[in-house]
Amino acid sequence: MELVTKARGKITVTSEQLIDIPEGLFGFEKYTKYAIVDSDYEPFLWLQSCEEPDLAFLIVDPFLICSYYETDIDDELLVKIGITKPEDIIIMTIVTIPHDGSPITANFQGPLVINKKNRKCMQAIINDNRWSTKVDIVKALSKKGDR
């Protein structure tokens, strides 16, 4: 499948890269079809909308940033996307790079929960005061070395 993106122009994606987010992301509910695309900066990836070329989110595996990150995901959410076994779950977080030079952050309170078998995804809400929507990635990485 070919996608048109703002950053890369026309790209080809495989069915394995496609993700269905039936309820959309918070604030972007009308967009439900996405592709996970490599970025130029590993380990970051792009979550590119298949419906809107200008809509893409930088994402990363939160466990690479914070090895002690824990998520208590509601069973109802897991059922909605067909999760039956923990090993079928992929967790990713949305990264924000502010234009004003503020710290690069990751949303640890609203992770993406992906079923790696059927490629369905939901954005969860983690009610745990250890995590925030703006976890400073550089600070978290420096603390990771302290543990």
Image: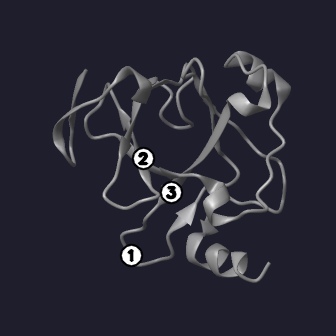
Residue furthest toward the left? 9
**Mark 3 highlights which residue?**
95
CB of mark 1 within 8 Å of CB of mark 2?
Answer: no
* In this rendering, position of residue 131 left or right of residue 119: right
Q: Which residue is painted at 34% across and 40% down in the image?
A: 55
* Percent coordinates x, y for residue 72 in the rendering: 84, 42
Give the residue type that dot 1 points to: Asp
Check residue 57 in the rendering and tell me which mark sits there, or answer none.
2
User: Residue at (73%, 41%) from the top-left corner?
Assistant: 125
* Element marked by disc 3: strand
Q: Looking at numbered disc 2 in the image, what kind of residue is underneath it?
A: Phe
- Residue farthest along the front direction in this orientation: 87
Q: CA distance from mark 3 to mark 2?
A: 7 Å
Residue drawn 43% across the image and 25% down it: 16
Indicate the quadrant where residue 68 lies: bottom right
Work out how far the residue at label 1 is from the one at label 2, CA to CA, in angstroms.
18 Å
* Residue 22, x across and y down, in percent: 55, 19
Say how many tags the image has.
Answer: 3
Inspect the image, locate mark 3, and give the three-letter code of the amino acid beneath it: Val
Q: Which residue is mark 1?
A: 100
Please tell me whether residue 1 is drawn above or below residue 9 in the rendered image.
above
Of callouts 3 and 2, which one flags the residue occurring earlier in the amino acid sequence? 2
Give the image location of residue 71, x and y in percent: 79, 46
